[in-house]
């Protein structure tokens, strides 16, 4: 079965959106399976720039795009994003877009709580995107969530609202905040309900049909493995599982459906928000990476922290997520450096480690061990074939795949959709 699952193998912003958009024309359906509008993907097609947060990145090519049950959905953010894209000429109808009716909703009370907690945490804050992601997932597993299907039964919402508001009112009181205005919440839900419901359905059924017809499904992960709630740099993580295995649970298909797992890997490392980052550079090299890579968040506009490529972290992510092959992105950002460095191990209290430890204090204390390579003077920007790459850049790619013990399937050399080198086709190659 020729499905592909795309996941980020670092701390997010690896260029997943660009690669999913590029692959979407070869797929019959694109499915988002976790996260919410904390994600931010920039797609560049000719002179057009599309910024997506919640919509699957297949929407721009018109491929059937599905939001799976594993996503947390802010209905107002969804409406705004759809309207923005329609303004850019993208067609979004129930024909090419569907939302799982068992998707939990992000409500204004979740955004409130996210903000209140972050403010109260002061210097210890996680640095969330402030979108209410964590509180919404908490209510999902706490069995208090209002879900998409509830929008069709708002006249019977009273008992669920009681449960949800009792919980939130107690938390809000602890922050000296007034209780939730239930009337206002209900009125807002009534207003937005028809918009969301036109796309709502049991998407597992639609996917079953699509699959039976032999269609190719592209699963689109958000964030990255190092932000996974189990495997990431806990507690500086997001509140969902970002690993490939979530594709099945988050869309309503079996575990055998994930197919080729394509890990998206930036040729260096970035992170936005707080938390450990062994190869972070606070010198002019870090600044140069940030400037050349335009490393500012799509969602919050925050400056991303930058550092050298960390092969230990990516090797770990690839193992945890069963990555079949990687797409190496932003290679062009490394153009023009005399030398480039790769982290190949850590030193922790005098010991050498070949993996990233689990404890937050150890994660913060590890010191990177670097290997230095000669850089390349020539430009790789816009290269579309292996033959266009300078010899030293090829050596860098080969060293990366050796260290992470995973082959390269694609290389990306600019934000533009077509500036992509195909080494192994994930829809054809079974790894
Ligand atoms: P995502 O969250 O993983 O989809 O990544 P983002 O879109 O948040 O961040 C990646 C940024 O890098 C975007 O601005 C892309 O347009 C840009 N980008 C993607 N691939 C490349 C590449 O190969 N080279 C350069 N220079 N920029 C790229
Ligand atoms: P894409 O899909 C980079 C980070 C936040 C914060 C932590 C928790 O564009 O790669 P949250 O709002 O999820 O509770 O924040 O996770 N984060 C991301 N960082 N890219 C993302 O998504 C991110 N989504 C969340 O900065 O550190
Ligand atoms: Mg992003």
Image (cartoon, rainbow, N blue to C red):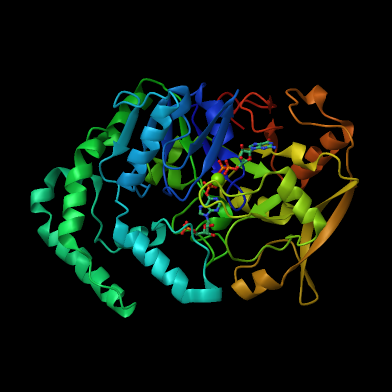
Q: Which residue is located at x 45 percent, y 27 percent? A: 88
Q: Which residue is located at x 34 percent, y 77 percent? A: 175
Q: Which residue is located at x 36 percent, y 45 percent? A: 77
Residue 120 % position (x, y): 45, 75
Residue 195 % position (x, y): 24, 36
Q: Is residue 308 in view?
A: no
Residue 40 % position (x, y): 51, 44
Above or below, 320 against 192 in this view is below
Picture quadrant of residue 250: top left
Picture quadrant of residue 124: bottom right
Q: Which residue is located at x 39 percent, y 28 percent? A: 86
Viewer-side residue, 185 vs 315:
185
Q: Residue furthest left?
A: 155
State left or right for residue 197 relative to residue 272.
left
Residue 82 % position (x, y): 37, 34
Viewer-side residue, 153 vs 258:
153
State left or right for residue 190 relative to residue 249.
left
- Where is ligand 3, by quadrant? top right
Above or below, 104 against 141 in this view is above
Give the quarter of the figure containing the C terminus: top right
């Amino acid at each position: 079965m020729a499905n592909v699952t795309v996941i980020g193998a670092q701390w997010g912003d690896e260029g997943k959106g660009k690669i999913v958009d590029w692959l979407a024309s070869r797929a019959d359906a694109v499915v988002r399976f976790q996260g919410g509008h904390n994600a931010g993907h920039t797609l560049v097609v000719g002179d057009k720039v599309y910024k997506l947060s919640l919509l699957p990145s297949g929407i721009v090519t018109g491929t059937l795009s599905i939001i799976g049950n594993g996503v947390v959905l802010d209905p107002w953010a969804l409406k705004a994003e759809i309207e923005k894209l329609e303004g850019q000429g993208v067609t979004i109808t129930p024909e090419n877009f569907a939302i799982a009716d068992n998707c939990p909703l992000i409500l204004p009370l979740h955004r409130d709580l996210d903000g209140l907690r972050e403010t109260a945490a002061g210097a210890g804050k996680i640095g969330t995107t402030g979108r209410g992601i964590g509180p919404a997932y908490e209510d999902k597993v706490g069995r208090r969530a209002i879900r998409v299907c509830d929008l069709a039964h708002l006249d019977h919402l009273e008992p669920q609202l009681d449960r949800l508001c009792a919980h939130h009112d107690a938390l809000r009181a602890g922050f000296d905040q007034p209780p939730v205005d239930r009337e206002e919440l209900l009125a807002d839900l009534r207003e937005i309900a028809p918009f969301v419901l036109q796309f709502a359905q049991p998407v597992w059924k639609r996917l079953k049909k699509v699959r039976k017809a032999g269609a190719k499904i592209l699963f689109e992960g958000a964030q990255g493995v190092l932000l996974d709630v189990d495997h990431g740099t806990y507690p500086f993580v997001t509140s969902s599982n970002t690993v490939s295995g979530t594709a099945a649970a988050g869309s309503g298909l079996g575990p055998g459906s994930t197919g080729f797992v394509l890990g998206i890997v930036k040729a260096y490392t970035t992170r936005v928000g707080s938390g450990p980052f062994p190869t972070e550079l606070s010198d002019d090299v870090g600044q140069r990476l940030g400037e050349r890579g335009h490393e500012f968040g799509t969602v919050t506009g925050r400056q991303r922290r930058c550092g050298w490529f960390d092969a230990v972290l990516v090797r770990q992510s690839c193992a945890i997520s069963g990555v079949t092959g990687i797409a190496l992105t932003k290679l062009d950002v490394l153009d023009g450096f005399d030398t480039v460095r790769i982290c190949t191990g850590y030193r922790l209290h005098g010991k050498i480690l070949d993996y990233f430890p689990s404890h937050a204090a150890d994660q913060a204390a590890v010191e990177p061990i670097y290997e230095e390579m000669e850089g390349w003077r020539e430009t790789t920007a816009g290269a579309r074939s292996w033959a266009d790459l300078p010899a030293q850049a090829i050596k860098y790619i080969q060293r990366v795949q050796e260290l992470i013990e995973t082959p390269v399937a694609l290389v990306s050399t600019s934000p533009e959709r077509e500036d992509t080198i195909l080494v192994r086709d994930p829809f054809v190659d079974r790894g």
